[in-house]
Image (cartoon, rainbow, N blue to C red):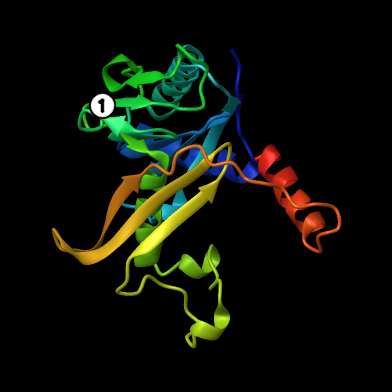
Amino acid sequence: VRGRFLCSMQNQETLKQWRQDAKNAGVEYFVGVDVGGTNCRVAVMRKGKPVLSHVIVYKAECNKVSDLKKHLSDVGNSLNELLNAKPFATALAAAGPVTDNGTKCIITNYVHGEQEILLSELPQSLFTANSKLLNDLESTCYGIIAINCDKKLNDFFVPLWKCLHEKEETKLEPHHYVVLAMGTGLGTGMIFYGQTEGHTHRVEPIEAGHSLITGLGKKNPHYKEEQKLLEYLSET
């Protein structure tokens, strides 16, 4: 069971600075774990910094909970040693329904018998008292709201029908939104407009089930474009 730590030059310089800060005054940081049906990724972000200042530090192919735990244990031990502290909180976003107040998840595309994650059984080096499990598209919806607050939606999204949008800026309007994401499966979530605990939008995870997608034939004018999309999705 092996993954790889992602150490670009920019990542190395960022983590070196964090390590120096940890020696001087300590570092408070969050960890985000993205668990899809094929890969898992781990990112870290310092507390109080913009959401897009995160650093992706680890990636591994994984389709069994037992292997996932080993990967997360390796990452937790390495981060604890590097930053001389455990995370302030860790959020694990998984492709499947989350129950029991964010403490249990079934990863639908994992190997049968290796699908159930319990928060209490994850390594404590990474999952401290403030940690929680989230549905992957629930997490995506929260991320959209966060980058909207930072006025960075333009960096990731463009209007699907530009003729309906006179404004150049892409932002969350006072509407409800359906969020779709293609990976190993089709993820779905909802962003609802309405004041909730001081926020203008709230998130609800939903399950669309295992949808079958019928591919286009070679004579279809969009065939090549669809094949490129499918090839891209298979590599990410």
Q: Residue 51, how many percent across, how many down?
A: 40, 53
Local secondary structure at mark 1: loop
- Amino acid carrying label 1: it is Thr
The answer to which of 70 and 183 lies nearer the viewer is 183
Q: Residue furthest right?
A: 219
Residue sitting at 48 percent across and 17 percent down?
Answer: 74
Q: In the visual, does 219 lie left or right of 3?
A: right
- Quarter of the image holding residue 213? top right
Furthest-bottom residue in this view: 166
Q: How many residues crowd mark 1 within 10 Å: few (<14), some (14–19), many (20+)?
A: some
Asked where in the image residue 139 lies, by quadrant, the reply is top left
**How far across and down, in percent of the image, does residue 2 sit?**
61, 16
Q: Quadrant of residue 144?
A: bottom left
Q: How far across and down, in percent of the image, does residue 143 sit?
A: 39, 53
Comparing 5 with 146, the one in front is 146
Rendering coords of residue 204 (x, y %): 29, 50
Q: Nearer the viewer, residue 221 or 156?
A: 221
Q: Is residue 132 visible?
A: no
Give the residue displayed 26% in from the left and 30% down from the top.
99
Nearest the camera: 155 or 226? 226
Whether 134 is drawn above or below 149: the answer is above
Q: Quadrant of the C terminus?
A: top right
Quadrant of the frame with the N terminus = top right
Mark 1 — residue?
103
Residue in the image at 52% along x and 49% along y? 181
Total numbered badges shown on the rendered structure:
1
Residue 19: tell me if it is visible: yes
Image point 48% across, 19% down: which residue? 68
